[in-house]
Image: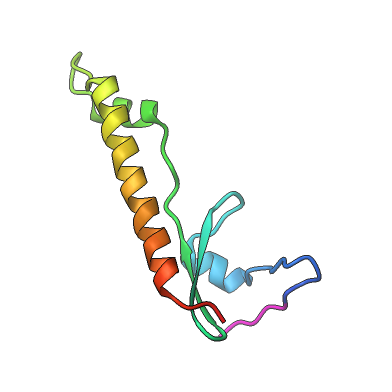
Amino acid sequence: MSMAKVQARGQVTVPQEVRDLCGIEPGTELLFVPMGPHVFECRVLPPQRSLMDLVERFTVGDVAPDLEKLREEMGESITRERLAEADHADRVTPP
């Protein structure tokens, strides 16, 4: 078990053991979700990939995916994810 202390400006250093086990590196985004009085959950968000990374990954031969359709689908997916996160956070009563 690891502990950390909140600094005056709200900053916390994530212990090295936790960073190693969870794959946390500089630039990694963390999501903090209040779960109830004195309890929160911290989730490591997966790295965001650029649209071009995805196009390169899923291009077969000379056939590339339709970029406009991909942008639209990704935007809708991201919106649904963010709304679900916000809905979850709204249902949890902060301390």
Main structural element of the magenta stretch: helix, strand or loop? loop
Identify the residue at image location x=45%, y=47%.
Answer: 47
- What stretch of residues is rendered in magenta? 1-5
Quadrant showing the N terminus = bottom right
| Left or right: where 11 falls relative to 62 | right
Q: Picture quarter containing residue 89?
A: bottom left
Residue 15 vertical placement versus 51 (above, below):
below
| Left or right: where 31 falls relative to 13 | left
Identify the residue at image location x=68%, y=78%.
Answer: 4
Quadrant showing the C terminus = bottom right
Tell which of 76 and 41 is nearer to you. 76
Q: Give percent across and percent down for residue 74.
A: 31, 36
Q: Picture quarter containing residue 12?
A: bottom right
Judge whether residue 57 can be spotted in this image: no
Q: Give percent across and percent down for residue 6.
A: 72, 74
Residue extending farthest to the top is 62
Judge whether residue 1 can be spotted in this image: yes
Residue 57 vertical placement versus 36 (above, below):
above
Q: Give percent across and percent down for residue 22.
A: 47, 65
Identify the residue at image location x=78%, y=65%.
Answer: 9
Q: Give percent across and percent down for residue 17.
A: 57, 73
**Colour theme:** rainbow
Residue 14 vertical placement versus 57 (above, below):
below
Tell which of 29 and 75 is nearer to you. 75
Residue 80 vertical placement versus 30 (above, below):
above
Q: Picture quarter containing residue 62?
A: top left
